[in-house]
Each structure stands twice: as structure tokens, then as C-alpha cells.
Image: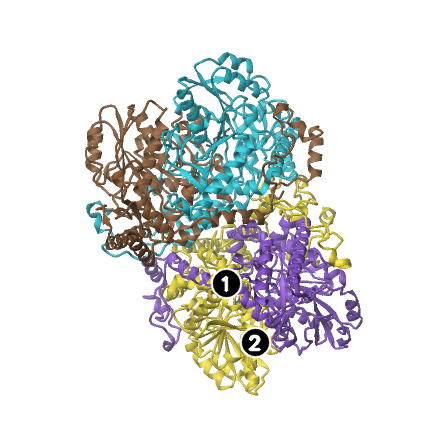
Chain colours: A yellow, B purple, C cyan, D brown
């Protein structure tokens, strides 16, 4: 299919809400082919001089001879391609992004600027330490912030994201238990936990057992006590939990876990709710990962990269992964080898997500101790405001106050013919990104709304007004509105079943032509 | 605080709606003993952009930027020219500040580029399918071993001696407690680490992991190895730490690889002191339901228009939980965008020219080093090779840094226990290396080595 | 009007093509209030420490005491505001922008990067010359390129845009004529000229007389000769002209003008068509401005800034404005005072549009001599391709070949009830920016299409296909489609008459509320 | 060439459609004598991004960036901290690469910010209306004089002695041939340049132009002047070269100005060696149809929704041609965007704090200079003042530059003929000046002056 052939492509059959155009474009929303369909062989958006003819001759028969199949585009086409694609995305910059558990807060541009300073961005990870003292100092300064904010004595900086942090923490726990000579086999995880928790436990060779929640949406302490025994290695508990609630019995839980000889992994993905308000170390946890890409505002980037440092107790610290940064009389050193120590090893190619460290530290310095506490306050205030404002038209799953996110379920949609999914898709037409849906699993048709602290009251009022309106229309029997949504987005609902049944995971020459 | 929109009046109004007198009340669920009554005073208060920027710039100034020095470091991270359009485009708000594309109707931008990215990775590696990225090359390598174990239902991984030791270590770490994996790794050799490798494969072996070019830069023909390994029912995992090499060298897919993992940093992503980087992961199509990580796939919308979605999610943690193929969730999204934009700019011709240029720069560097009295240890290399110095490499490298030259990576930094590598230095030269840089290296080296 | 009040705002009366939403937003297209409507007093997106209480006390009664009235927003709101606004704009990055006479070509990002190097961006214009040698060398290097490409011996760098360049050139001409003791009063300008030409001539105290075009769209040489006399100071001629045609008789015109004792100002806005192909100096012109923001790709920025250096003959050079850059034994110097010389003075606060110079030089170095010639070739090729491809359905005003733009008039719309304006607005729905309309004035209902060289064949084919389609629908009597267009843009047609009749040129508190 | 999409095959196909054998044929209208047969060989051929970037970086390195030195230069251009969000947002493709918003349906982004910008400028200056920008402060000043002549139908402009001499020169240049203007300008005085100014007004005087703070930093009460000038039927044009001063000082509108022109660079725009900058232009509403430049105005679309358009275009060259109020077309669009974003970030409070901070930094600098033996010449100043040195200022400034300190602007650089100003230096201190910078200035100055 060539670009211009689009002209003849008419969508027939399916009823569309949008007027037809000959070009396929719709005003400022441009249809955009795949880069492969924009190819002209021999064209390039780079002007590298042709290398000497014999440049690759030393490869002999190992030289690549057949065409690779990469498309040739000029720079203007490449820029346009990605600009057009970008315009099909929702973003926090363009609107409220109330994805519960994701902490879609404003990403300050100062952080981007700092991360690009050549003194950070253009450092090779294997430079002699004397030439990277500022970088090591930066890692250490961030580590100090993390330890101070969490009240924990140690931190492992290299995990690449939250899930890697979980692995780091659980491996430290397992190494520690084995070091105690007390290998165990079970990890307790609440049903409400994020999928990475059980997946990580499994990667650590543990069997996952779930612990029930009580009617208040918290861990059932009594039930937990029953589960605890000498085969339980650890509990993985998210706090505030994925229902957006603080685990009221957390100190007792920690005590019970420790009494049973197990350790307490805390999932800190929701740290935003309590930063500066509560030090998890004061609650008795043993380790916790922190998503710098949530609480500390490094951008999500459409799926990553992230960074998941793990704070640890003194007991777990010796098992932490390498490398680590230490300061001695001569400056900062990077410890890459564990001289006879107990480190469980290396988790990442190099030292960690430095580009996220510079951003997160910039963010912390900007807010300061006072500002970070205000972050927690405002994020919790906003969620409670939403909970209070919508409780008459939607169905909150638990009593408030909540922490930084408000959880609703689909009881208010009962008998309307509208599902949580339908409801969420209608938000798209209204200019909002949907909330997190069907998570956590402990309530039916969950809708988890996390406004974050960087939304203004006006913006939140607009969300509340829109959700009220939608709830009322659902109850008024206007199910079609929901079933047809979204109508105003670059695409209407996509056929996910077909995608999974016969996966097309890459472009292949000729395939599109054949399909038409 | 510039990032916090509420005024005190807003807060008061919201508290009224909530029916709470103070924000403190909202934290009533926190055990009293753990409530902090005021901001932590061992941390500084908020600061202006100017003040923060000054602080961070002061830290940055304490580093020797590879942009300000002749730089010949490689060993798994390469300094390449990044076209200005790349950084501009990845900073588009709609790419930078969006989440994982779970709502495809308003995420087609991300989904389509992921689909294109997967295709590019498959083409580069010569494989059938590729995923939407993992954290980095090293963790991708570990995931490949775990996947090989799932596919073969075997529990032993054989690692070639010249696999980057960080990769080896990450494989060891990530398999330590997972699935009773047994990792058999060998010591590095300056010669051919494929020698005797196939013999280490037995009927419990899930895979053999080999890096190409290896950690000393040697490019080898893996076809015989692939046949031998596969004949014993194991998979061949090929690691590529310099993705650009595939612009000049036969792809692992053509050599018979079952799984290919690469570090994708070289395209579009700055050195950044080691991260964030980009794990590429490609395999045979028949293994796809065992793959770790996200996959974008093509489908249609309810108006029949082509569109893209995340698919085969039943492999993933958010659906399958403890039965997932991996625990990965957040991956290297924006790094994959930088990669795919850079590669789109290059295209077939640009990639080949750039790869050829790297080979030429490396040859010029090797010539200069040989001229300066070094022994070249790598017979067939792409843009990186090993040389033997007249003095311990770590001393030489430190001394050259004092001359403002980032000369290479001492082999003992990678293999601290390999005394026989004491005088070996790894040297990489990309298109960013100028003739002046090479002259500066040679001159300084002569000075230091005498 | 508060942001949330939007919820209750329904557009009634006027028929809209778009489905209604409660929020007023439409999917990814967000309605956005004015910043003033987003105000919360006391809020700020900057964290400047409060200055000492007495900081402003030295101003006494001259201190500003009453509120200024500026709105208080946080950074997240500011970022969202401008991101949302941006999304309502068409741009060259997102699509073909065929504005004739505007040269909307790709703006390479390398140029942006270079312009932001601290060694350029952070220079004060009054730094000691020893500290800005690289900047002066850069200006001189760009000057060399401009002189070489135009074949002219001198260039004045300071004019801020094309119009300022015209003023510069005409002032040099006037100063030169006065220096000759031969003050004159008339400037001849073709009717097809850009409005800045007569406006500039008037600013220079000249009376404008127009010269007619012949049937081929060029200056009528015979008619021109008749107009020439000893009261004519200069001719201002655009070449290639605004009909997209090369002035075939230009050498003769120059001769005639010079014989009459007048001078030849060439408007170089269309230099893109001939760069590397023709040196205007070889045609006999006396001076010419160059729009760096057209030919040399500095971005238009939604209206500016630009840069309009003027190349000059040796005769005119002494009259050029200050400052100038000269190289001597000790390096580069900035000549800010004309020691008894003939310079007509200073045109700009400082030395010129340095930020555009760095970009333009970067662009030139990227293309090189060969690439710039190819620019001309491809821009001309593209325009002729459009002309040839559409001549059967639209009405070209003149025979080809044309230069870098193709001119059509509205004869093909005769009796269709569709005007040039309607036709152009229909392009918006199809995802294209309209061409330049109703300019030049010499043809009826002009449509001036300039594709530039940075559009691919596929992209141009898409434009051609779309225009064919629209022309056919107009002829098929589908006038409604055109009258209602645009339906798919962020706004439908705006009432410009109302805007001019009772101008609202600023926001005032309370006005919006009252209006609703 | 990376910016040119055509392949040779494309070109051939297009030529076929055109019916031409070669591109040369398309240039048949060019006189044969003027056709160049090949690329000009006195210019270099095309080059890669890397090569071009290296070339430009080498030029940039030959300059002393004000970011790397204590910088106290002002005189109409000021170094301020620009929030990172500003540069990010102005680089949005839709702002950077769009044209003048002649098609309002797809230009609401630009039009709305221009409407907001006009409002901000009106508020800051205390005037009723403002336009959408002119080139810079100096050309705006000249346009103000021309407009005053149109409004009053008089042809004489009286310039105060302490108007920035570049502004004076641009007024002289732009009025030289236009409308028989007569420009009466006075010499600079270290005292009060308002003294006797009103007396220079006669019944042919269109306007009096006065800068506040003046070129030596003096802030004055212009109300008596305004009354005197207007009593004689002339207009008062007030020039502000440091727009930030209006965050602390009484606005010209409150002092009775008829037209206010400012250099807007200080907000959002880098020093950039003098351009592009941003001319602000505000006036009384009754003069609006005589204004130069573009104006954005509010209206509604055919669905009744609020929207914005360029309006009152009958003043402009593209409609009115030789009768236009000015020849200006392209203005300072993107600079006005940077300005309005910066001001939106500051808001009322941020602007006032920043202005106060500038005053405090300037006072600290003045104290240090007085401590170093200088005489402070400016009694009431915002962030800029004049000092008398012990040696010729131009010598001192050059000597301090050798110490890496950008100390100030010698008055004789602005007024080369004013021998009495030989030892006078203009010094500006903004929020970017640190205590260390001030100490460095004072120390170096003591060293140089003895
Ligand atoms: C509660 C919770 N835990 C863990 C994770 C995993 O973090 P990451 O995506 O950074 O691996 C998430 C992320 O969504 C989460 O919400
Ligand atoms: C032919 C012509 N001349 C002059 C100009 C004026 O240039 P500028 O807008 O840079 O002042 C233009 C710009 O549109 C033009 O097209």
C-alpha cells in the first residue's frame, strides 16, 4: 500500500460517526502509514559519507550481504511520521490522567534539562572513577534522600523499575534467610496486589499464597496470623494498598511477620500518598521499592524507562546487589565486586538508571522536605475530594478517608447495561483518560482513580462533573452512548480478540496489499 | 511550590466538601506513632529552578564528559552521534508523558511505533518476531535463559567464556532462585571461546549463550555452533551488545539463533552513565507465547480501520500473575522510541554507511595503536577490539584520563580475577572518533608507555 | 467563566457536525479557557524566594502598588495550557503546508540544537569583542555564503525580516541617489508585488506607481520603459515573481532601469527557486533581501522571528546600516560607529537576528553547495509536477514551466457556487493547510501552491489526489461540502467581520461572564 | 541529502508527468548567460550532522558564554533565568513550524496565546491595548514615533537625552525618509534628562520619547512630563528596555503615557547576542486603528464557539499596501510565545518576587562596587545603575574580561563621543547574579583599579 493509495480506501460496512474525507485524514488528525509503507529504497535521513569500499571487507563471509529490509526515509518524513503519531496519544501534559496505581503526575521540564547536561548524559559507565566523581556524588545524594524519606538505613540503586525492585528485595530476603540457614518456600501476597508481586515471588522460586482482605479493604490480621508459619519467607504488602487505603494494622502485621521468622516486603508504588508524612521504616518493614517514575516524577515515556531503588534494613543491606557507591577519604568509589561478601549479585548491565536518578534528584531538590510533604497532603486531599464528591452517584468500594486514590466499583452501573469498560471508554470522548479498570481484583468492575497532587481544583471539578454526568446518563438508560464510545478518538474500539487469536506482530512486505 | 496548583483557599474548600477539618484527619489511619508532625528537617526545603539547576550543574561539572574528550570506551555501551531530531521527537509531550498504551483508542501513537520497532528489531536480528523491549541487554539475556528453560523444559544454561561478564552475572542473579537453573560459565579467553562450547551441552541443557562480537570484539561464524547445540535439543541464545554491528555483519538469525538479545543503546540513546538502556529481545515465532515483555499487534477498530493494541497479554504479570513469563511491567518505552526514530532516519543505506564508517574508524584506531606499540588481539572485529599494552591496562587508562583521553576499558575492570588479562585494554571507535582524537590517543599512549 | 462552568455550556442554535460532550472537549481536542480564566490569586509556577521586605523600598512613590492583574497558575497548568493550545495548530511538522510565497519547508532540528549552544545563546550583545570572536566569525561566515550564492559583493546582516530588508535596501538606494545629488520620488512596483513592497516604498518617502504585467505574467517591458524617467528612483521586482514565474526579461529590465538612472531592488523572498542555479548578481540587480526564514529554513514560529539580510552592489555597500563585522589582523571586529562614513544608520537594537544566523548557517553547511542547488531543482520540479497534474481539473493562470510555486485561479470554480475561500477551507477537513489565497492580486481568486523541496512524491501525490477530488466535487455541484467546511477542525469558520467591527483585543475581568 | 525526500526514480517519474526531459528544461526562462551549470565550487559540499555540529560547536567555543562567567551586562539586554518549560513548549512542532495564523480554524493555538499575550502586555504597561509584537524595542520605538505623527498629524519628535542611543539611532533611521519627520535629540546627562524636556515641545511636536528607567538606570516620575506634553497636543511615548522593571515600578500607563514600547527579551528570551528579540507595543485604545503590527481579536465561529482571529488587518501591508500603518509582516511570533509562557509561569506573585529579587541583587552589587571604590551615579534604580570608575571604563571592562568577569558596559560604547562619560560603566544585576559573582566582580575590580 502506498501512501497515496489511501485516497481510494473507503471504510464501508461499519457505521462511522465521523464524516468521510477523501484523504482519510480528519482535520488535524492525520492517518499515517507505517514507516515501511513510506519507504523509497536508497533514501536516508542521515548523510554519513560512504565508507571506504574495503571498510567491511575484513568481515569476509561474515559480512551482511542481503538487504536488511529497513525503509529509507528523509528527515522531513521521519519527523512528520512521529509528530503525527504523537498526536494520536493522550498525555498528562494534555489532560488529567487518573490512572490509579500509576501516579501520573506532572513531569517538570527542569528534570529533562538537567538529565541532558553533557556532564551527566555523556558519561560512559566504565570511565575511570576519577572522571565521574560528580555522577557518583549524585547517586549518593539521591540515596540519602531516599533513605531519609523512608527512614531506612540502606538502599540498592540499580533496579530498573518497580518489578526489578521487587526482585531485588525478595532476593535479598531469600539470601538473608538462606544465610540464616532458614530456607522457606512461601510468600504471602494479598489478592489485591499488583501482578508484579506474585510474578516476582515466582521468579524468586517461592510459592504464592494469598491473604484475604477484610470488609474494610485491609489485610485481615487474624487470617494473616493463621497463614504465618515457618515455611513463610515473606509477606509482600503494598502500603497504601491498591484499594487506596492505608493498612491500619501494618505495625501489628510487621510484628506478626517477624515473630514468625519471616520478612516484610513493602511494595512502595504508592509512596506518593505518604512521602514526608510517614517513614515506612517506622512501620517495621524490611525493604521496599520506590518507583522513581511514580512518586518522583520521572516521565512514564509511554511505558518506560523507570527506576526502582530498594530501601533495606541493616540486616538485609549486606545482601544488596552490586555495584554500590561508597564515599571514602579520596572521594566516591564504585564497588563493582563483592570481596567475599554476601551480595546476591548484579541485576543490571551497569550501575542503574542514571538518567532517572538525575531527574528524581532534581525533583526532590525542587520540592524540598516541605514540598514533598505537601505532595502527599495534596494527593490525598484530591482523592478524598473525588470520593466525597461522587459518592452519591457512583459506588465507593470502601469507606473513606482514602489515601491518594479513590476506588469505586460497578454497583452503580447495575442493570444499566453499561460495564466498567463502557463507562471508561465514554470518558475518552469527554477528553479524559480512563481511570484504572478492573484492578484491584478484589472489587467487582473496579475503577481506581488517582488524580495526583498536580491537578488543580478546577481540573478535578471538571472530572467530577463529567463523571457525574456520565453516571447520570448511564442510569437514565442511555446505554448506546457508552457502547459506541469512543467516537471522537483517533480510533474506535479495537478488536483485541482478533489481535490475540492470530497475532500480527510485525510488518511484512506485501501483507498489507494482500489484505486490502 | 511551582508544581502544586492548590491555594490554601482551594484546600479549605475541598476539606469542607470532604467534611474534614484538616488534612491531618485524612491520615487518621496511620498509626499515631508513625505520623511525622512536620517536614523532615534533615533534608533541605524547596528551592527555585535556578538554585536546583545550579546545584545539579555543579555536580555535572565534576565529571569529564565524553563529549569533551577523545573517547574510546565500549564494553557494552557506545558513544554514537544521535541525530537532533531524535531528542526533539521523544520529548513530544504525547510520547514523554503518556503511560503504557493500555487504552489503544488514545494510544495509537505509541502502539504504532512499537509495532514498527518490533519489525525493525526482527529485521536487524534476522529473527521472526521481537518484543516491545526489556530493561537492557543484560536483563534481556537473563530473560532469554529463563525462556529457553520454559521452552525446552530443561534447567541448565551454558555460557560462553567471552560473554560480557556483567551479562553473565545478571544471568546468574536472575536465575539463582528461579526454576532451579544451573548456570555453567567459562573463563574468558583471548582466543576462540566457541572452542569446546558445544561439548558442554548435555541433555539437561536448555541453552547456550554466546556473544557476537564477543567481549573482546571477535566476530565469529556461529552456524556450526547453532547446529551442534540444536542437535542436542538446546537453544542457541545470541547476545549482541553493539546493535550497530548488525548493519555490517551477518545477523544471528541467519546463523541459526533461536533467541537473540541485544543492548539497543547504540541507536538513539546517550551513554548516560549506564542507563536507562534498551533490551532488545527477538526469537522464533513459535516461541512467542513464551516470550517475556509486551507485544504490540495489529488489528482493526469497530469502523474497520487498521489499528494496534498490546496483545498476547496472557503471558504477562498483570493477567497471569505468578504464572507470567516474567515479572516485567514498566520497560524501556521511550528508549525504544529513540531507537526506532534513529533507525528510521538511517534507513537501510544510512545504517550500512554508518556501520562501515565505524569499521573504518576502528581500523584507523587499531593502526594507530599498533603504531604506538600495542599488540592487536582481535582478528575480526566490528568497531571494538582488544590490545595488549606494555604496562598494566588499569594504570595506563588512569594515566591517560589525566591527559584528558578516555582510552579504553581495562580488561581487569571486567574480569578482576583474570591476572593474565592485566595488560589488555578494550578499545572501541565509533563515527564520533575524529582523526585528532586518534592522534591524541596515540600520542598520550606513547607518553605514558614510554 | 470558570473552567468547570464549561460543563453547562451547550452550543445551541447553530448546527454542529460534531457530537456534543458534557465537558466541551472532543476526544483529544480539548477546549481550553484563557489563562486569565485559570487564575487563582497567589499561585505561581515559579519559586522565587520572597525578596527582602525593603527590596523595592528605594522606589518610594514610584513603586507599583495596585495589583497588575496577572493570573496565578502552577507549572502543570501552564504546561497543559500551551500543549492544548498547540494541538489546535496546523504545522509543517504535521503536514504539507502549501502556502505560496511562504516557503514552508522542513525545519531541521539540528538548527535548533546549534542555536541553543550556550556559546551562542548566552552571549550578551555588548560583551567585549575579544569574548565573542566565534560569534562574529559565524556572522562573517554566513555573510560569505550569502554573497557567494547571490554573486553580490556586500551584505547587510541586521534587518530583522523581509520587510526590514526591503527598508534597508530602499534606504540604501535613496541614500545613494541623494549622495549622487539625484533625489527622485517614485518607486515602480508591479501589481503582483507582496504588500510589503509598496508599504516599504511609502516608508521611504516614495510614491508608488504600479507597472503592469503582460499576458505571460511577467513585467511588460515596453510598459515599464514608458514608466521610466528621471523621477523614478527604483523598481522593486520580485524574482521569481509572485506568480511563481521567472522574469524572463530581467536582464533587459535591469538595463533599462539603470539607463534611466534608477536602481533595481529585487525582492528575494522567492530565492528558494533559484538558489545555486542563478546568482541574482548576474542579472544586474542592485540589492536584494533574503528571507532566512524561507529559503534557509529558520522556523516561521507562528509568525516570526525572521531575518532579512540584504545583499548589495559595491556602489550601495557604503550606505549599508550599522553595525557591520570586519576581519582584520587581530580577528573580528564589530563596527558600531560609522567614522564619517555614508551609512544610513542603525536599523535594529543590536546586531541582527543572531539566533537565525546560527540556524541558517547550520542549514547551509548541511546542504552544501550541491545540496542547495538540489533544493532549487526539487522545489521547481515539485511545483511543475503539481501544475502538470492538476491542469486538467483546475485552471492554471499561466503557461508553465513555473518556478517553485504553481498559480491557479478560480475559473474552474465558475458557476459552481464555490469560491476560492470555500475551496481552501475544504482542504482543512482533508488534512491539508490551504494554499495562499487571493494573492497575487493579478489573477482572480488566486490559489498559489508552493510545495517546497522537502515534500516527498507520495505526499505531493496525496495533495494532488485531494485537490482533484475536491475540484471534481465542486464541479459535480456539491457546494454544501465547501460552504460548511471546515467541519473537522478545532473551530469552524470564524466571524472576522464581527471581530473587526467591535474589536475585542484583550481579556478583561468579568467580560466573559457577562457575555454568557 | 537528508532533508530532500526524492530519489532519482521519483524525479524521473515526475519529469515524465511534466513532459520535460531534464530539470534544466524547467529553468528555460532563466537567461542562458545567468544559468549556473554546476554547484558553486567556492562553497563546501553537503556534510553530515556530526560534521556540521562540530563546525558550529568550534565557533561557539570561541566565545565566552555569559553562563560561564559572572555577568553584569545590561544596556537593553538582560540575562534572566528562563524556566525549562518555556523552551520545551516553544519547541512544540505546532508552535515552531506553523505560519502566521491566517487560517484561524487551524491556528487557534497561536491566536489564543497572542490574545493572551496582548492582554499581558496591556496589563504590564498599564495601557488599554497592545499588539502582537514588533521586531524589538528599538524598532518599536521608531514605529511609535511614526504612529504619533499619524495620530497628531505633526512631524517632529523630541527624544530625551537618556534614551538608549541605539533606540535614538533607529528612530533617526526609520524616520529619515518617512513623512518628513524631524528628530530632535539631546545629549546624555548623568543628571535628570527630563529637565527642560517639555520646553522642547512646540506645536509641531508629535511626541516626546523618554525611557524609564533611563539608559543610566534612573527611574523617574513621568506624570508631570506627561501633563506638560499632552497640554501641548503631543503624545508621550515611554520606552522600557527592561520589562521586568514593571513588576516593581509604577507602569507608564499610570504615569500618563500615550504609547508604550518595550524590549520584551527579558521574559522568556535568551541574550542570544542581540536577537531575535521582542518589541512590545501598547497604546490607548482610541489609537488602535493607527497601530502598526498584527492584532489578535476575539470572535465566534459558525457554531457559536468563542475563537480568535487576526483582526483590523486593514491597517496592514497585505491589505492596505502603500497606505499601511507599517511595512511589518513577519514579527517576533515565537519570542512572544516565550514571553507569554514565562509570564504565565511567574504570575502576579512570581513577577513581583522576581522583580524584588532583581532589586536586591542590584543593591548588593552596588554596595560591593561602592565598597570597591566606585561612585554610584544612579539614585533610584531597578536592576541597573551607572558607576564612576577610577580608570577609563572600556579599559577596565576589557581587563576584567581577561579575569573571566563580564563587568558591565562602558558608557562610551553607547556614546562614543561623550568624553565626560569615559569613566562611567553601566552595571546590571539580575537574579542570575550570585554572591560569588558579586565577590568575583569586586575582587577583580580592585585588582584592576588598584
Ligand atoms: C502497586 C504496584 N506495584 C508494582 C508495580 C510495578 O512497577 P514497574 O511498572 O515500575 O515495574 C506497579 C506499577 O504499575 C504498581 O502499581
Ligand atoms: C514576496 C514577499 N516579499 C516580502 C515578504 C516579507 O517578508 P517578511 O514577512 O519576512 O517581512 C514576503 C513574506 O511573506 C513575501 O512573500
Tag 1 residue: A356
Indicate the position of residue D46 as horizontal and vertical percent values: 61, 42
Which residue is outermost to the top? Answer: C226
Place of residue C454 in the rendered image (x, y in percent of width and height, measured from the top left): 60, 39
Name the residue carrying label 2.
A337
Quadrant location of residue D157? top left
Front position among marks 2 and 1: 2
The image position of residue A73, as x and y in percent, is 64, 46
Residue at left offset 75%, top offset 76%: B200
Height in image: A90 above or below C314?
below
Q: The C terminus of chain D is located in which quarter?
A: bottom left
Q: Is residue B345 left or right of residue D404?
A: right
Which residue lies at the image location 33% right of the left edge and 34% below the top edge?
Answer: D141
Residue D306 percent location from the top left of the image: 42, 39
Left or right position of C33 against A509: left
Relative depth, front residue between D214 and D347:
D214
Q: Secondary structure beneath disc 1? A: helix
**Is A376 situated above or below B308?**
below
Q: Is residue D94 above or below residue B72?
A: above
Amino acid at each position: 500500500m502506498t501512501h497515496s493509495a489511501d485516497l481510494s480506501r473507503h471504510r464501508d460496512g461499519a457505521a462511522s460517526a465521523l464524516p468521510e474525507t477523501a484523504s482519510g485524514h480528519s482535520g488535524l488528525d492525520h492517518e499515517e502509514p507505517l514507516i515501511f509503507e513510506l519507504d523509497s529504497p536508497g533514501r536516508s535521513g542521515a548523510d554519513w559519507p560512504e565508507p571506504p569500499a574495503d571498510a567491511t571487507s575484513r568481515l569476509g563471509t561474515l559480512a551482511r550481504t542481503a538487504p536488511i529490509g529497513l525503509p529509507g526515509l528523509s528527515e522531513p518524513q521521519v519527523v512528520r511520521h512521529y509528530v503525527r503519531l504523537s498526536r494520536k496519544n493522550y498525555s498528562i501534559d494534555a489532560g488529567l490522567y487518573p490512572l490509579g496505581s500509576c501516579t501520573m503526575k506532572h513531569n517538570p521540564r527542569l528534570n529533562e534539562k538537567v538529565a541532558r547536561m553533557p556532564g551527566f548524559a555523556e558519561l560512559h559507565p566504565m570511565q575511570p572513577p576519577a572522571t565521574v566523581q560528580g555522577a557518583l556524588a549524585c547517586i549518593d545524594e539521591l540515596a540519602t534522600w531516599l533513605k531519609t524519606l523512608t527512614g531506612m538505613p540502606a538502599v540498592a540503586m540499580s533496579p530498573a523499575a518497580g518489578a526489578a525492585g521487587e526482585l531485588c528485595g525478595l532476593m535479598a530476603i531469600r539470601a538473608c534467610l538462606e544465610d540464616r540457614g532458614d530456607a522457606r518456600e512461601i510468600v504471602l501476597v494479598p489478592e489485591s496486589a499488583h501482578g508484579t508481586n506474585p510474578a516476582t515471588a515466582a521468579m524468586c522460586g517461592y510459592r504464592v499464597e494469598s491473604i484475604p482482605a477484610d470488609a474494610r479493604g485491609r489485610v485481615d490480621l487474624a487470617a494473616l496470623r493463621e497463614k504465618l508459619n515457618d515455611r513463610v519467607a515473606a509477606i509482600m504488602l503494598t502500603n497504601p494498598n491498591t484499594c487506596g487505603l492505608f493498612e491500619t494494622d501494618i505495625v501489628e502485621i510487621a510484628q506478626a511477620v517477624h515473630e514468625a521468622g519471616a520478612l516484610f516486603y513493602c511494595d512502595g508504588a504508592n509512596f506518593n500518598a505518604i512521602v514526608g508524612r510517614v517513614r515506612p521504616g517506622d512501620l517495621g518493614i524490611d525493604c521496599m521499592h520506590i518507583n522513581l517514575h511514580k512518586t518522583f516524577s520521572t516521565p512514564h515515556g509511554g511505558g518506560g524507562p523507570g527506576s526502582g531503588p530498594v530501601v533495606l534494613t541493616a540486616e538485609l543491606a549486606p545482601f544488596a546487589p552490586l555495584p554500590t557507591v561508597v564515599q571514602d577519604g579520596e572521594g566516591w568509589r564504585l564497588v563493582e565486586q563483592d570481596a567475599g561478601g554476601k551480595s546476591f549479585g548484579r541485576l543490571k548491565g551497569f550501575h542503574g538508571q542514571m538518567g532517572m536518578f538525575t531527574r528524581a534528584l532534581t525533583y526532590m531538590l525542587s520540592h524540598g522536605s516541605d514540598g514533598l510533604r505537601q505532595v502527599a497532603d495534596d494527593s490525598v486531599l484530591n482523592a478524598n475530594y473525588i470520593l466525597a464528591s461522587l459518592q452519591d452517584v457512583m459506588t465507593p468500594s470502601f469507606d473513606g478517608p482514602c489515601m491518594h486514590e479513590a476506588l469505586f466499583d460497578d454497583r452503580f452501573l447495575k442493570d444499566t447495561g453499561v460495564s466498567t469498560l463502557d463507562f471508561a471508554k465514554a470518558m475518552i470522548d469527554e477528553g479524559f483518560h480512563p481511570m484504572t479498570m478492573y484492578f484491584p481484583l478484589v472489587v467487582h468492575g473496579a475503577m481506581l482513580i488517582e488524580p495526583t497532587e498536580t491537578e488543580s481544583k478546577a481540573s478535578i471539578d471538571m472530572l467530577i462533573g463529567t463523571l457525574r454526568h456520565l453516571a447520570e446518563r448511564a442510569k437514565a438508560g442511555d446505554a448506546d452512548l457508552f457502547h459506541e464510545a469512543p467516537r471522537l478518538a483517533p480510533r474506535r474500539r479495537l478488536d483485541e480478540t482478533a489481535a490475540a487469536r492470530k497475532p500480527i506482530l510485525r510488518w511484512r512486505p506485501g501483507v498489507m496489499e494482500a489484505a486490502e | 511550590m511551582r508544581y502544586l496548583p492548590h491555594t490554601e483557599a482551594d484546600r479549605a474548600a475541598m476539606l469542607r466538601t470532604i467534611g474534614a477539618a484538616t488534612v491531618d484527619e485524612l491520615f487518621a489511619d496511620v498509626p499515631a506513632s508513625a505520623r511525622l508532625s512536620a517536614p523532615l528537617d534533615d533534608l533541605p526545603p524547596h528551592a527555585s529552578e535556578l538554585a536546583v539547576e545550579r546545584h545539579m550543574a555543579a555536580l555535572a561539572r565534576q565529571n569529564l564528559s565524553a563529549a569533551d574528550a577523545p573517547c574510546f570506551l565500549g564494553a557494552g555501551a557506545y558513544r554514537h552521534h544521535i541525530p537532533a531530531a531524535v531528542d526533539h521527537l521523544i520529548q513530544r509531550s504525547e510520547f514523554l508523558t503518556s503511560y503504557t498504551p493500555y487504552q489503544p483508542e488514545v494510544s495509537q501513537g505509541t502502539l504504532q511505533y512499537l509495532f514498527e520497532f518490533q519489525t525493525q528489531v526482527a529485521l536487524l536480528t534476522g529473527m521472526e518476531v521481537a518484543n516491545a523491549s526489556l530493561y537492557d541487554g543484560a536483563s534481556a539475556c537473563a530473560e532469554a535463559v529463563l525462556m529457553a528453560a520454559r521452552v525446552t523444559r530443561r534447567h541448565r544454561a551454558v555460557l560462553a567464556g567471552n560473554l560480557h561478564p556483567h551479562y553473565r552475572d545478571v544471568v546468574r542473579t536472575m536465575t539463582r532462585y528461579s526454576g532451579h537453573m544451573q548456570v555453567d560459565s567459562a573463563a574468558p579467553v583471548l582466543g576462540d571461546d566457541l572452542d569446546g562450547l558445544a561439548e558442554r551441552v548435555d541433555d539437561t541443557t536448555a541453552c547456550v549463550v554466546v556473544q557476537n562480537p564477543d567481549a573482546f570484539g571477535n566476530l565469529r561464524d556461529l552456524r556450526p555452533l547453532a547446529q551442534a547445540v540444536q542437535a542436542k535439543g538446546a537453544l542457541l541464545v545470541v547476545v549482541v551488545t553493539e546493535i550497530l554491528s548488525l548493519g555490517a555483519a551477518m545477523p544471528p538469525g541467519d546463523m541459526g539463533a533461536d533467541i537473540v538479545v541485544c543492548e539497543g543503546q547504540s541507536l538513539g540513546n546517550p551513554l548516560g552513565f549506564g542507563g536507562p538502556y534498551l533490551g532488545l529481545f527477538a526469537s522464533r515465532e513459535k516461541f512467542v507465547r513464551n516470550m517475556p515483555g509486551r507485544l504490540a499487534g495489529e488489528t482493526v477498530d469497530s469502523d474497520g480501520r487498521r489499528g494496534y493494541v498490546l496483545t498476547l497479554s496472557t503471558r504477562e504479570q498483570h493477567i497471569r500473575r505468578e504464572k507470567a513469563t516474567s515479572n516485567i511491567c514498566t520497560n524501556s518505552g521511550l528508549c525504544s522510541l529513540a531507537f526506532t526514530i534513529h533507525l528510521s532516519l538511517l534507513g537501510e543505506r544510512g545504517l550500512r554507511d554508518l556501520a562501515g564508517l565505524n569499521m573504518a574508524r576502528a581500523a584507523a584506531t587499531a593502526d594507530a595503536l599498533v603504531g604506538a606499540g600495542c599488540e592487536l588481539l582481535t582478528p575480526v572485529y566490528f568497531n571494538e577490539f582488544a590490545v595488549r599494552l606494555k604496562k598494566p591496562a588499569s594504570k595506563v587508562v588512569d594515566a591517560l584520563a589525566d591527559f584528558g583521553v578516555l582510552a579504553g576499558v581495562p580488561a581487569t575492570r571486567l574480569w578482576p580475577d583474570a591476572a593474565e588479562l592485566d595488560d589488555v585494554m578494550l578499545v572501541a571507535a565509533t563515527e564520533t572518533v575524529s582523526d585528532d582524537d586518534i592522534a591524541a590517543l596515540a600520542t598520550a599512549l606513547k607518553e605514558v608507555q614510554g
